[in-house]
Image: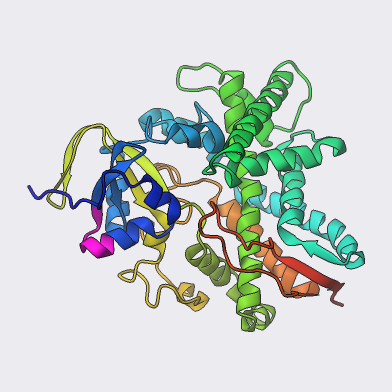
Amino acid sequence: MFGIPSAKGFDSTFALLRNPYGFISETCRALDTDLFETRILLQETICMTGAAAAEAFYREDRLIRAGSMPGRIQKTLLGQGGVQGLDGEAHQHRKKMFMSLMGTERIAALQSTSLHMLKKYAPDWKARNEVVLYDEVREMLTRAVCAWAGVPLDEAEVETRTAQLTALFQDAGALGHKHWGARLARHRLEKWAARLIQQVRNGEPQPTQENALHVISTWRDLDGELLTPRVAAVEMLNVLRPTVAVSVFIVQAAHALHRHPEWRQKLKDDEGQLEPFVQEVRRLYPFFPAVAARVESAFEWRGHHFPEGCRVLLDLYGTNTDPRSWDAPLEFRPERFRGRTENPYDFIPQGGGDHYMNHRCPGEWIAISQMKAFCRYLVNEIDYDVPDQDLELETGELPPLPTSRFIMRNVRCLD
């Protein structure tokens, strides 16, 4: 068997932190390989990139998620006991709970709720000197997803819950006080969500049966038992947090509209251009850099040995911009998605494989729906000026956003 090429140095943790979106793919290119071995946080790790690597990564009989994620991510972004850390039949059964929330009508209902929020916020934008789009969208999505999920949200707590939900994804990979702030946010959110779960089980409040709060509160695992209040709270946050995180994609879409202004008119003229535009934003703009798994039992792939217990990182951004799968991969070309045959392994901004069977994010359809709704509104319902500001994406930040968070001025409604 051929050995796996090795990255330079004893441990690559700081190299990954310095260049989270380029480290894996650039190291692979330098070594002329699709994978290499290194240490991350002193743990032996195999890093992989590309569509073929993604297909191997999502082989459920080889790699598992339990114990794969670094503790600092588990205690901020994901929580403990949730669907992301399950495998096999337990994972598939829990995944059904989330997929039951992703019907066409439910996704359309969430989009409608978000558009209602937009129409409430826009008049206020007109009266203000400037609007920070990221801040506005985060609050709108917090309100919208709580209303959609049946989660009661008092006006006095909107700002707090928005900040807490944001911390879970924005500061998940941070160091120092931001990391501890994210852990505190998770602790408080889980207590809040567990209290709501228990109230539903006690008979109040009573959300309608299709709402996420009801579905999660009444879901029974394979053993026939209700989820514990803490695990149910983690899963409730697995509905709220990713929806608020779509604010990143929406700001990135606004950034793309500004950098490629010809697409404003294209989207005005042809509604059919909207989905290719949104998909190209998801492909080209980074979100999370990689996903992790662990080798359940040793196996070989392409002549390389994967030892039992080893952590494996799959490069998301590098796979989405792999020149073997994409022509001119670093150019913004939404037209590449027109008539394109779908491949579950070369386009993986929110994971790869099958939504039902694998660990692909069930909220992917929500992200696409929300992005389309906000882009349609930005193009057809309002006009605005983009003043001089720092619009460079902070790629050392997870996920990367413009430093200014995208400021708009002179917002005006279109007739």
Q: Which residues are magenta?
A: 28-35
Residue 291 horizontal side relative to residue 272, left or right: left
Q: Is residue 328 above or below residue 237?
A: below
**Total number of numbered labels?**
0
Colour basis: rainbow
Q: Position of residue 308 (x, y in %)?
A: 21, 33
Please identify the quadrant where the C terminus is shown.
Answer: bottom right
Residue 378: name its quadrant: bottom right
Please tell me which residue lies in front, 104 or 321. Answer: 321
> Looking at the image, can residue 93 be seen?
yes
Residue 382 horizontal side relative to residue 102, left or right: right
Please tell me which residue lies in front, 192 or 30. Answer: 30
Q: Position of residue 184 (x, y in %)?
A: 64, 30
Residue 313 horizontal side relative to residue 165, left or right: left
Please name the residue shown 40% across and 60% down the image.
22
Q: Position of residue 2 (x, y in %)?
A: 9, 50
Q: Is residue 293 above or below residue 257?
A: above
Residue 33: name its quadrant: bottom left
Please tell me which residue lies in front, 4 or 244. Answer: 4
Question: Is residue 29 a member of the stretch shown in magenta?
Answer: yes
Please name the residue shown 70% across and 57% down the image.
134
Residue 136 horizontal side relative to residue 5, left or right: right
> Looking at the image, can residue 343 be seen?
no
Please tell me which residue lies in front, 240 or 185. Answer: 185
Question: Is residue 24 a member of the stretch shown in magenta?
Answer: no
> In the orientation shown, which residue stands out farthest toward the left?
1
Q: Position of residue 217 (x, y in %)?
A: 64, 25
Please name the residue shown 49% across and 67% down the image.
284
